[in-house]
Amino acid sequence: MRKINTRNFRLATRSTPRDVNRRIVLNLIREYQPISRAELARRMSVRRGTLTPLVRELVDSGVVFEKGTATTARGRRPTMLCVRTRGRLVVAVDVRSGRSSIALSDVGGRMLARETFDTPASPNQLADLLASEVTRLLRLHAPNGAEGCQGIGIVLPGMVDRKTGRLIYAPRLGWRDVDLRASVSARLGLKVFIESAPIACALARLWLEPEATRSVNSFAYVSVSGGIGVGLVVNGEMLRGETHTAGEFGHVSLDSSGPECVCGQRGCWEALACNAATVERYADALNGVTGSPDLALHRARVAAFPGIEDVIRRARGGEDAAVRTLVETGSHIGRGLALLVSAFNPGRIYVGGEITEAWDIVEAPMRSALMAGTIPGSAGATQVVPDSSLAEYRLLGAVALVTAPSYAALAVG
Ligand SMILES: [Zn+2]
């Protein structure tokens, strides 16, 4: 089983040296494109002759193409190498409780089509729905149909066993021990990759921001949406744990008398800081109550309430209750980040999710809760940054599941 690692080729244990070298070349072309053969050889510290057959193989297979655009000081125009994205497509699926998304992207992460749908109640219904949706999307937008499709990436709000591809448990969906990968793949005959959303999002950052992620040894990705999930990259390696449940910080209780969580505990980080928690607190603030004793009634009232996007919009309009709610969410997010910093001391924490749209409001309270929750000095050097691809951060995670393994090799230079 090759681990996901875009840097350390020694961990790509099952690959032949030729495979590894081809991946190194591909990685460098993607990162520095357009790049000449001479520059590529310089970055790899090899002679051009060593490179020639590897580049030829990539060009022949259609993964890389040549274009003559650069002009050198002496006026010669060397052929430049670029990674081919056109016609090479990926289907990305972001499964959430409530509404899910499906998108067609090129292998560079550019979204070509995107739709949302009501998340079906059971994994089998989801597999059926994906079978028809994927076929339809490819027929509409892919010139070569399924032929150009490199695979389907599916991100889920739950723990996934990397080896078997089984979804172990998704609390918000109520799904346990499901082989979604096999059922989708059997219906479509395409390669399917499945992963927990925050792990996929962390992988997407490694893939899309090689410079930034290489500048830190370890980083964390915190996905704040329907729930809270954490992906951890330690020394360039995705941390999974013995039974694939590492990073389950969302269900660490921060307040034993806090709101009830889907997992049955009280005051989990997720129950305090996820989107629904924010909306719920906002509804309470407006209604002047702090949680109705009639839970069903309370939930119905909150469900009828606008989503977090509306809370943010109202805060932007200067509504005091909305601003206070978001400030409190920032503070709750920061309390959980303190756990991450205490446990892993990451160089950077990415935060992804709708809440990042209100970054200017949540950042300061988040930072102060983070500082307050850690030993003095330990969090000072940890950057906390919003994921730059707000609207599609989880879909990009799904794309990365399909594309990043081709780049899983040491990037030298
Ligand atoms: Zn919980």
Image (cartoon, helix red, strand yellow):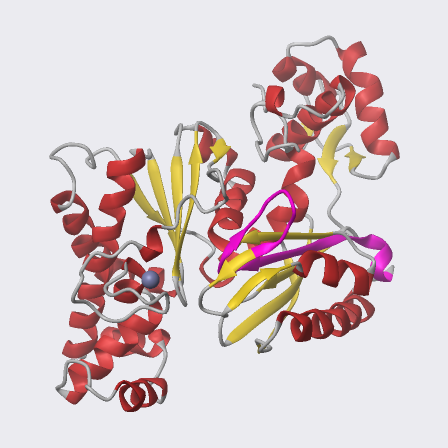
Residue 70: x and y, percent? Answer: 69, 29
Give residue 251's quadrant in the image: bottom left
Residue at the image position 21 percent from the left and 37 percent from the top: 379
* Nearest to the observer: residue 297 or residue 337: 297
Establish if 147 lies above or below 373.
Answer: below
Q: Magenta includes 404?
A: no
User: Which residue is painted at 73% across and 62% down in the image?
Assistant: 184
Quadrant in the picture for the N terminus: top right
Whole-percent x, y for residue 259 in the image: 23, 71
Image quadrant containing the C terminus? top right
- Residue 318 in sight here: no
Count of picture labels = 0
Examine the structure image and report whether residue 154 is included in the region drawn in magenta. Answer: yes
Relative image position of residue 349 (x, y in whole percent): 34, 43
Task: Residue 276 in the image: state x and y as whole percent.
Answer: 34, 73
Residue 309 showing in the rendered view: yes
Residues in magenta, as a range: 145-167
Taking 301 as reference, is 20 left or right? right
Q: Judge whether 77 appears above or below 252 on screen.
A: above
Residue 265 lies, with reference to residue 67, above or below; the image says below
In the image, 263: left or right of 149?
A: left
Which residue is located at x 19 percent, y 47 percent?
370
Compare residues 278 and 245 and report the one nearer the observer.
Answer: 245
Identify the image quadrant of residue 92. bottom right
Residue 183 appears left or right of 96: right
Residue 69 sits above or below residue 412 on the image: below
Q: Quadrant of ligand 1?
A: bottom left
